[in-house]
Image: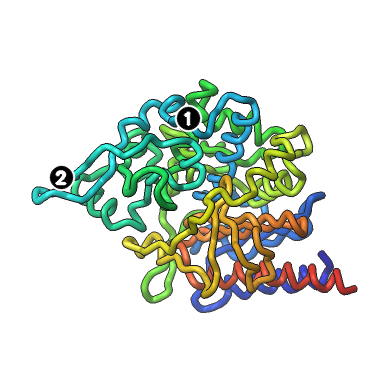
Amino acid sequence: MNSGFKTTADAILAQSVQGTPAIPGIVAMLTDAQGTTYEGAAGVRVLGSNQPMTTDTVFAIFSCSKAITGTAVLQLVEEGRLDLDAPASRYAPEIAKVKVLEGLDADGRPRLRAPRREITTRMLMLHTAGFGYEFSNQRLFDEAAATGRASIIGCTRLSLQSHLIADPGEQWEYGMNIDWCGQVVEGITGQRLGQVMKERIFEPLGMADTGFTLTPSMRQRLALVHQRGADGSLAPIPEPLLPADPEVDMGGHGLYATVGDYCRFIRMWLNDGAGPNGRVLKPETVRMAEGNGLGELKLRELPSVMPEMALEIQFLPGQTMSWAYSFMLNDQPMPTGRPANTLAWSGIANLYYWIDRQNGIGGFYASQVLPYGDMPSLMAYAQFEMAAYAALANRAAA
């Protein structure tokens, strides 16, 4: 990208941390298949501190973890060790205990029944297994409030035993599916998910600052999550939301990483599965994984039942979204300039990325703000992506 894009992107970040309402701190990077073409940082890691946001800042990346876990699953499929259409309980026996939650009885106890079919790993990868999240599903929220069931944010084994809200294979429902994918990987390899990722993904890609456990160096560079109040004000949450040394490596939401490391992961997808220190996926696996796995099913808008965690997720008018292995796909071109069938997703603390294999570029925008869908954060990210495609168009026209 040229110097004009750098000037524009730097200004977007600076204005976003100085505006009203502001964002505490942002790191954003753009990459092509060869390397990072832009990196910028603005603001602070923690409001009220003198710690500037820097490009090597460590973030809790939450659901941006999903695609990395999905990559570990695809590696095992390549090796013939995992059948996507076999019962997932073959590899993660505990998933066989999961029931469908129909509601609460008069005494506030869960009304449960057996699912109509077994869950497969393909369903988990595509979010059609029937799992949801309590912040977007009233039944799960009510059940957790009535029973005191542990939140998945705690990354405990008990929190994995969430109920289904739909029968497996019948609808797209965003939820803790990829956490169970991590358990499938552990069941096949006999290793913790973090160790599998380290050996098979992070080392081949040079991702030295990514993991489920915070090293002393990563902790020193950690940005804290901030909560937006109704008046637009922000307050830092004093401790990391994710445990620094979790009981379970939660593949759906548990990783810490730098933006630079995540761009290394993006580049692997831009390079048909190749990394600087070895191949991570075969080209044919990448081509399979980038396709729509849902058929005629589409992503649906998600309500908000915990507005402090996530606002209602709505798509643009006229836009429909599909799901790949394991990314969102936009069925139509986006107003930002993103072409159709671009891989993308996000993390609940307003982290966003996209992987445009058609144009050979990708980007990652990272902040640490709740709730998800925070408007100042969304606007800053959209402006960053739009500026990237405007610069790409200008370069093509030159």
From the viewer's perspective, tell me whether residue 272 is left or right of residue 77: right
Q: Nearer the viewer, residue 291 or 304?
A: 291
Q: Which residue is mark 2?
A: 109
Q: Earlier in the sequence, mark 1 or mark 2?
A: 1
Helix, strand or loop at label 2? It is loop
Image height of 299 relative to 283, above or below? below
Residue drawn where x is 36% and y is 58% of the image? 136
User: How crowded is the residue under tag 1: few (<14 C-alpha within 10 Å), some, or many (20+)?
Assistant: some
- The residue drawn where x is 46% and y is 47% is 127
Q: Residue farthest to the front?
A: 296
Which sits in the foreground, 159 or 22?
A: 159
Classify 91 as above or below 149: above
Q: In front: mark 1 or mark 2?
A: 1
Residue 387 lies, with reference to residue 58, above or below; the image says: below
Expressed as whole percent of the image width and height from the top left, the position of residue 384 reads: 66, 68
Q: CA distance from mark 1 to mark 2?
A: 32 Å
Image position, residue 192 (x, y; %):
51, 27
Q: Residue at x 50, y 34 (%)?
A: 85
Q: Identify residue for label 1.
A: 86
What sort of colour scheme is used for the picture?
Answer: rainbow
Residue 93 appears in which quarter of the rendering?
Answer: top left
**Kind of residue at badge 2:** Arg
Amino acid found under the numbered disc labelled 1: Ala
